[in-house]
Image (cartoon, coloured by chain):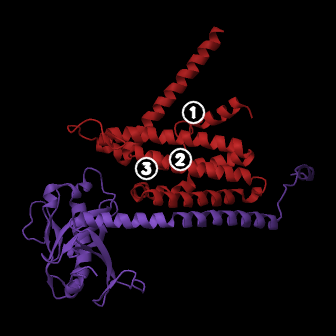
Amino acid sequence: MSSEMNVSVPLPQTTPPLVMIRALGLIAAICGLIIVSAYQGTYDAVQENKRIAVERAVFKVIPTAKSIVEYWALPDGQIEKVGAGGAAQQGAIKFYAGYDERDALAGIAAEGAAKGYADSVRILFAYDPGQQAITGFGVVSSRETPGIGDKIVTDKAFLANFPLDAKVSNDSLANEIRAVKNGSKTSPWQVDAIAGATITSRAVAKAINDTAQALVPRLATHLDKLKDKP
Amino acid sequence: MSKTDRWDEFMEGVWRQNPIFVMVLGLCPALAVTVSAVNAISMGIATTFVLTCSCVLVSLLRKLIPKEVRIATYIVIIATFVTVVDYLIQAVSLALYDALGAFIQLIVVNCIILGRAEAHASKNSPLPALINALGMSLGFTLGLFALGAVREILGAGSLFGIALFGGSFQPWVVMVLPPGGFFVLGLWLLLFAALERRKQRKALEVAQHA
């Protein structure tokens, strides 16, 4: 390469670093302002939407419920109303107590999640302390295959699995709630899987079992307190 | 800028340079969220918002942005409007938010938006930038709708959630699964390629006769 060629190439114009920092800083400030105002402006609507979504899901699994109260079931066996001071403890399980129009306990709902075929299947199930049974469930979110895995909410034979026995013995359920192969259900705590959607059926059973094993025994001693709406 | 110029600028993205069918850009959301017409249009509106706002802001700030850091600046601006649209969709409908899933956040890396900011908005004043962005957005939304409508009709037997064929229809489930997205996109690309070829042949015939 000759020295003449080097001379003929014009030096690229460079921007001083300070100018770059100033421009980036200014743009970041404008963007920050836009984001914060969007967050503030939508906060109430988003929270309201979330509350309505939870309420709707709980009312669906506890059909006689007219109002709900949210609780934490703490690992030490105590229960505490959500928002009654103090952040959620490690291992605390959130549950929703549903009350009917006379403010009597209609049922208890809690969330569970387990790995399904495509992604984690999140469900909300209802526990009836009177029957000591899981009376039904609804899907909170799932990416299961349309027409196959999503049959868990429409398949009549699958829904006939409920109520599922959830009696307590010592500090856990007397019997593990689990899915069995289609047509081989023999006990009231077994879930008869849908033929062709065994993995999704298993996820539902596991999601219920995982939460119920920890939650239901904690509830037993507090049923008097939960019986009437506070 | 005359009226016809503006119309040309607008139609550029809607038809001649349609982001999906001609430039074949932004295919990640185009294939992933188009399982129903409603999802497709919602995604189109979200992208429209981000694209137009980003292009106008980039165009307004174009003299201030040093060229060495322009890509970083564009990404910051695009990410800002994606965050805004994320909050807005949550405020409008959580069901819609869940249906669109991660693809709202992924608008940040939608190459149509960065491409428009770099190729058009950074070189033009806000009005042409806005018109061009609106045209591109409409073209993208139409493309998504063309995919979403066909997939919903074949895969679920409905359009906008309204059943079209009555109870005896057996849905063609593969159409709402990922492979269906590729099938339908392929067919639309075939149609557009055929139209383009016919136009070229006609132009050639005219040239030969002249």
Along the horizontal axis of the image, is A194 left or right of B151?
Answer: left
Q: Which mark is residue B15?
A: 1
Tint applied to chain B in the drawing: red
Q: CA distance from mark 3 to mark 2?
A: 11 Å
Secondary structure beneath dot 3 equals helix
Q: Is residue A4 visible in the rendered structure shown here?
A: yes
Please say if A97 is above or below A15. below
Residue B131 located left or right of residue A51: right
**Amino acid type, label 1:** Trp
Mark 2 sits on what residue? B26
Residue under pointer 3:
B32
Q: Nearer the viewer, residue A108 or B175?
A: A108
- The answer to whether dots 3 and 2 both sit on one chain is yes
**Dot 1: few (<14), some (14–19), or many (≥20) neighbours within 10 Å?**
some
Viewer-nearest of discs 2 and 1: 1
Please identify the quarter of the rendering in which residue B170 is found: top left
Amino acid found under the numbered disc labelled 3? Ala
